[in-house]
Amino acid sequence: MLHILDLSGQHVKSFEAHTASVTDIAMDVSADWVATASIDGQVVVHSLSTPESQTFNMKRSLRTVALEPNFAKSSTRGVVCGGMAGSLVLHEKGWLGYKETILHSGEGPVWQVRWQGRLIAWANDLGVKIYDTSSQTRITYIDRPADSPRADLFKCTLHWQDDSTLLIAWADQIKVARIRARPRNAPSASAGAPAPFLVEIAAVFQLDCMVAGIVPHPLGGPSTAPAPSSSSSSTHSSQRAASAPAAPTPAPVPTPSAFLLLAYTPPDAALLAGHEATSDRAEQARKAAERPELRIVSRGGEELAADALGIAGFERWGCNDYVLVAVEAGAVARGAGAPGGERFYVVLSPKDVVLARPRDWRDHVAWLLERRRYEEALEEIERQAALGVTLAPGEGVVDAVYIGQKYIEHLVGEGEFAKAARLCPKVCGQDTKRWEDWIFVFAQNHQLQAIIPFIPTESPTLGHLVYEMVLAYLLASDRQALLRTIKGWPKGIYDIPSVIVAVQAELDRAPSSSMNTTTPESVILMECLAELYIMNRQPGKALPYLLRLRRPHVFDLIRENNLFTAVQDQALLLVEFDNELMEKEDGQAEPGQSRAISLLVDHIHSIPIGRVVQQLQSRPYYLYLYLDALFHKDPHFTSDFADIQVKLYADFAPNRLVDYLRASNYYSLEEAYNICNERDMVPEMVFLLGRMGNNKKALTLIIERLGDVNRAIDFAKEQHDDDLWEDLLRYSETRPAFIRGLLENVGAEIDPIRLIRRIKNGLEIPGLKAALIKILQDFNLQTSLLEGCQTILDGDCAELARDLHRNQTGGFLLSAQTSCPICTLPLRQQLHGLALLYLCRHVVHAHCVTSDEAIANQLDYSVGAHQGISGKIALTAMVRAKIPQGCPVCRRKAEGERVQHPRSRTHVHDVPTLA
């Protein structure tokens, strides 16, 4: 009976194909066709998806069978088998059915055959041979190891690792055969055509056990034996190896680099030596065999891991009773729910089917948990999560939360509270109840300070009692931490009024809670209260504490919460506080950047100017800063304090006084002059004298005190006073420096000839020549500019005259319906009526302008004398003499009377044009 199972052990289907025991099973790469060989001498090929099947009767007991790899798609559908008859027979499908081809015979039973690609490998009593189906030649022979035990007791196992690598395990020896293409010039041992391939033995391994099966094993996972789970028709069990698995490490190259062996240890050494016959009945009794093992052996021959299998009845089974097969879940178990590409190993015994898989990180985590190595288990889970590994449903053995809970319990029991607290965020996550339970555990153990830095305030948010308990603990034990916690925690997660009451009670009990003295403890408590009041939307109550503490953000607090009326009587305190802050900053800020001054100036409606000035009277410098800022915002704000401001500028900003004197009109000139005179501020005195009208005295100050000819010239220009210029010239007659300065800065205000004539004979003036040359050059330049301007002006005038003449002599469009703007009647109502066209382009009836009939009588249409140039000129002169007032329409418009606008004109009308 042939049973088909999936990788989960579920029965798929069964075939009753043989009358005796099945000795070998083979499948093609599609896993859709399966072939079985039996000792009844038959080979049966079944399709798993269709009812199709094929039977081959070989008449003798069979030991092995193999299908063509692409059996499902191949047209030949080859089947090769062998057995006790000693022949290896190939069955291939042709036009008329299957044909048999004996590939080899005469060397004893064929124990195993395996087909890969175009190559067929088989083993008999003498050794292993490989046959090439394409060239139909045998390409190699690999002899059986010397002194090998009986082949019928310790079978040969063949496994194709790939198309060019054959693994041969026979008794206690492993050979790795490499198949490569024969070079064209390589010699051949046979006289016929050379074989297309060469075979070389790449490695030979001698073992301390018999090999019942061999498959390649990739080392991309942990270097441990696969974990087996066994099942049979009567029992179903699973187990894990007792050896400690190492943590899986990713291999840089996923190429198989080790062997997985099914190891069998003979119970009787006589079987190996071939001395089975004995007269001793005790020795004749069959000895119990040991458990088979799965071993991982590296390519260097080193045993990496081993795992004993719990096979039912293993004491009775021999080496040939076991089979080891590697299965890729992606190819065979698509419908079994197994992950695609996962590798499995199947171990067969007469009573059990054992499914083994390589140990993975889940097994490693489970092994760590058994030994309470929770930290390593969590690190492994995190590492796998970082690699993107996800857990399938039901894999609770690697539940990070459960492991974390156990780890925290272990740490708390060991007294490692700091380490346990650091682990809580990972373990508790978003679970509010778990967080609260652990926080209370820490509190009961008087270790609340260890977990406070890790307590979440959002996502999740815990109950307010938890946060209030923490704040109460900090208020009693660590007030610096209390302040940091209040600043760091969001508002709304605890009852702020309750905390305010508790902190205020502590502040009241402090020995130095008065307004005049503070201690470090009371400072911290006041900061806590200020923060709590601000969070509770009571900034007004926080302001006194902030002012006592000299906190810089008090200005931002006042602005943001509109607390200006609360500080209108504390202007001096604010300015002094701000000045202290600026001194602490090593004077990096400019006086005009004072935040207190800016606050007072920007909110004069809430903080009256007069009240601020009254408070700052005792500190003139602060008063100067305040009034100066007000003046820059609006000069009218300081009009009532202009005289005070003059004195303040003279004391604290003399270089800015003259600018203020020029910009303001509210100060007393006499008082300002006295202030400047007391401080000998000559430029300011000159300006004030000029404003008071005492220009001569001002000029005298410039000349005698300053000696600045340029300033004297500028002052004379500003005053526009000829007498002042005369005084300046008279004073300069005896001073060469002033003469030269006047010559160099001469302009429209003074005639240079007038100045030159005043120069006394014999007076030596340094730089006179250069000054005169400059004057001449300036006059030449001025003359050239005037000539150029005259040329441009003449050209523009000529162009405008031409445009005027063209416009006045050009034609004018009229229509038959054009009306007179005075009488509103059509211009051509009378056939021989006279119409007047003015240069402003208004057309009117002549009789609407004057009632004199002489104008009409002058027009004789029958003679046509007016048609000539001279006639037109004479007529125009006569009309102009009769109507000297100009255009009546324009005159009426100027007088404000309404005139009738002419209708649109589209046609030319022959009317006299008069100028």
Image (spheres, rainbow, N blue to C red):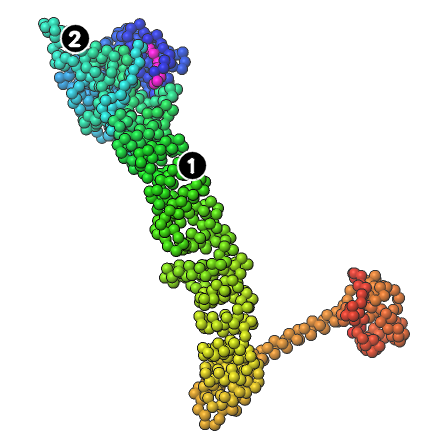
Which SS class for mark 1?
helix
722 horizontally vs 186: left or right: right
Residue 833, how many percent across, how many down?
87, 69
In the image, farthest residue toward the bottom: 761
Depth order, front residue of 285/19: 285
Q: Mark 2: give few (<14), some (14-19) or many (20+) Cα within 10 Å.
A: few
Judging depth in this view, the residue of 175 and 128 nearest the camera is: 175
* Quadrant of the rendered image containing residue 821: bottom right
**Residue drawn where x is 18% and y is 27% of the image:** 302
Amino acid on which the number 1 mark rests in the picture: His
**Vertical relation: 154 (above or below) 830:** above
Q: Nearer the viewer, residue 233 or 560?
A: 560
Residue 82 numbered tag: none
Range shown magenta = 2-8
Q: Residue at x 30, y 22 (%)?
A: 344
Residue beneath label 2, please?
A: 286
Q: Quadrant of residue 225?
A: top left
- Residue 183 placement, left or right of 645: left
Magenta stretch: includes residue 7 = yes
**Rendered location of residue 460, percent (x, y):** 42, 35
Which image quadrant: the N terminus?
A: top left
Please name the residue shown 22% across and 17% down the image. 292
Element at badge 2? loop
Would you say residue 673 sits in the magenta stretch? no
| Mark seen at residue 464 | 1
Under mark 2, the amino acid is Arg
